[in-house]
Amino acid sequence: MTTSTIERRDLAGSLAALRRAGNPFRNYFARNPDDETCARFHVPELYAGEREQLLAVVDLYRADPNTHSEVIPILGNKGTGKTHLLHTIKHSTGDSRQLLVAPGVYQRDTEFLEYLLYQLVDTLLGGGRQRGVRPIESIGDALCRRILSKAIPELTATEKDRLFPPTGLGRWARALGFGGLSGEERARKLAAALAAPTPGPVAPRCLRLLQEGGLAAADAFEIASAQINKTETHNTAGLMRRAIYRGFCKATLLGDEGELALFLTNGFAELPFNVRPSRQDLVLALFKATMEVFRGLQMPVVVAFDQLEDLLLARRGDDGPRIAEAFFAGLVQAMHQLEGICFLVFAERGLWNRFVPSLDGYIQDRLNNPVHVPEYGTIQALRLEAPPVDLVFQVVETRLRGVLAQIPDAVGLPPIYPFTEEQIVRIAKSESTLRDMLIQFRHLFDTLVYDKGELPEVAPAAEELGNLIQQITEPPPSMYETVVETEVEAPLAVREVAVVEVELPPPLPMPTPSLTPEGLAELWEQERRAARRKLEPEGALQGSIRDLQSGLGELLSFCHEHGVKVGPWRLQHVAPEWNFGEHPTYGTLTLAHWTCKDGQPWKVGIGLFLARAGGKPKDLEVKLAAFDVEPAVLDHLILLRPDDDLALSGKSKAMWADAERRGRHARIEAIGIDGFALIASFPRWLSVIRDALAEGQPMPSLAGIIQDKCDRLLEQVCMPM
């Protein structure tokens, strides 16, 4: 049996330092693929083989952008590390980029392709980063460099001289006949720099190259716009690509993301069509046009469904088989209609084995279709197993590294202190998943470090030290064996060495600390802050409109199920998402029936009125058209509007006045970005809670927390009190 040797004079100080540093195993699982916990405690060797295989699959789509869309299931028990693996794929520092879309919700009441499109739009316009850069920045940079590198050499000599005049000493040199770079030479040099490939994922560099080449960003935008107009066709697909290219260039070169956001949420539906397409045809046309842009950049699109069990079975009383069949049927339909998408499905084995065998044969065939990957052979599915003991040691050392660094004079302490090798081996061999191991390490750390008060500063005699260690760990006597050897040279021992052997107690079921009311409130606050960061960029609110609507619907559904009241009003029925009309972005509301005491319920439609600039009239027109649906579904309409753009003018003002004259009951409520972040974070928060629950553990009471955090929001989406 291996032992740990520690100088007794350092024992009290070391444990005190560990207490101050906190338990590094407290946050033992990744909440989502963007959770910084993954980066802090990443062990590169963990699932390295599986990660390399998945990246090799993605490379197939980089090498051939027209590769058929396929799905790769990644299966493992709950707590195996699937979300952490997805994080490393999304944020790793590899040599190449991909656009990774990781839906946080499944909008089961929406057509699958429409749901998928708006997950893509949300990822493009949002503030979330992949490998340190927002997708709109990395894609826009690559697109601008490609367009400009082709357009600049095609400029006339006069245009080149005008755009690249000699500067500084170069002007005088040419005036005196000593040469200097001509406009032609400077243009050729800049075009070559823009076209040069860049190894590795570096920060966007188009603006820097333009500045170094002496070309103003505004002039570059005009050149790019002219090139786009010259090269793109005038059919529907060409008009869509033209608008997307121009939107990316304007965002990159002029810092204006509004044009791209407006087109991806409304402009595509306003194109001059000979025959007005249906809602589904509009969605498919925009999706195909967007995919052509990515394929032209050889940037693979990866759609990763993480925690599939939470996406599909999020609500009490869900009809699991029906929802799973609708999801997988939609997934297969998307694979047939769209080329070049790599679908990754991270799921529990039990869920996969329960639902997939019962699906229709053609769905099973597509889900089980193997993918041939050079150097790896044929991949049909990846299965994640519990890590071996040597990797568990690395995980423990990585978690402890930060706290051990806070111990003064920590030289000589083992990297697994305060654990012993025997304890780590026993946990690694007795637990079936990495999460279960981390839970036990958390419990053991608390037991060894926190269970008793501060140790005395003066080291006790050997016999007292043994008793003290036994009191700190506080197990039943039969579970521990303590052996202490000491060498005393003087009173208060200048050199005293204690060799302690401590056996690990059996695993104990421990409640998750974060599921206390205080922990739950703080957890929601963490998710709200993360959601706020993603919603801050210019077009992010518009791009996330469908996710926000889904989040609002889920919040009100939960309030209905748990009896949350707003003054005298109580929810009698909630339809989380009601889709109407032919506009895929704006034609969605949440229906909530509010009842007061014994009165008749008011049928309230609640929508997100988020469009900016030219999109405002259309957004308002579509929302007000909900009153015209037969049979009537609305008595009252509430529109949530960003508080920095409340004023109605022109056509919007006229439409609102006309609705009032016709007796339509409607109002606009002002919401700040923190309110929208609260809505966006709610589904993520619920998902984290469900994922943290032990098998069979009931959902904690959340009504009080929701009432406290959402009091103002609920008043805004309710009938007046």
Image (cartoon, grey):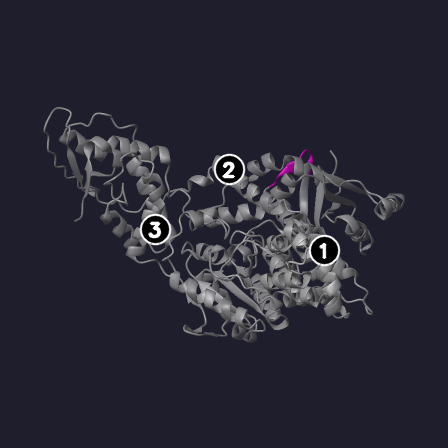
Q: Distance between the residues labelled 2 and 1?
A: 49 Å
Residue highlighted by disc 2:
522
Whole-angstrom CA distance, mark 2 to mark 3, is 26 Å
Kind of residue at disc 2: Glu
Above-or-below relation of 441 to 474: below
Tell me, yes or no, if residue 554 can be seen here: yes
Q: Is residue 306 above or below residue 552?
A: below
**For the residue labelled by badge 2, is the local secondary structure a helix, a strand or a loop?**
helix
| 584 relative to 682, above or below | below
Front: mark 3 or 1? 1
- Near mark 3 (Cα within 10 A), the count class, few <14, some 14-19 or many ≥20, is many
Can you give x and y, in whole percent of width and height, for residue 40 in the image?
42, 47
Residue at x 70% of width, y 38% of height: 716
Q: As rendered, which of 236 and 227 lies closer to the eye?
A: 227
Q: Reading the chain from its start, which is encountered first: label 2 or label 3?
A: 3
**Which residue is more in the foreground, 179 or 31?**
179
Mark 2 neighbour class, 10 Å CA radius: few under 14, some 14 to 19, many 20 or more: some
Q: Residue 219 carries which label?
A: 1
Instruction: Indicate yes or no whether the magenta region holds residue 566.
Output: yes
Which kind of residue does numbered mark 1 sit on?
A: Asp
Q: Contact (CB < 8 A) between labels 2 and 1?
A: no
Instruction: State the residue in front, 110 or 9.
Output: 9
Magenta region: 563-569
The local secondary structure at tag 3 comes to helix
> What residue sits right under mark 3 in the picture?
395
Calculate the distance from the C-alpha at mark 3 to the C-alpha at mark 1. Answer: 52 Å
Disc 3 residue type? Val
| First-in-chain label (2 vs 1) | 1
Q: Is mark 1 on a helix, strand or loop?
A: helix
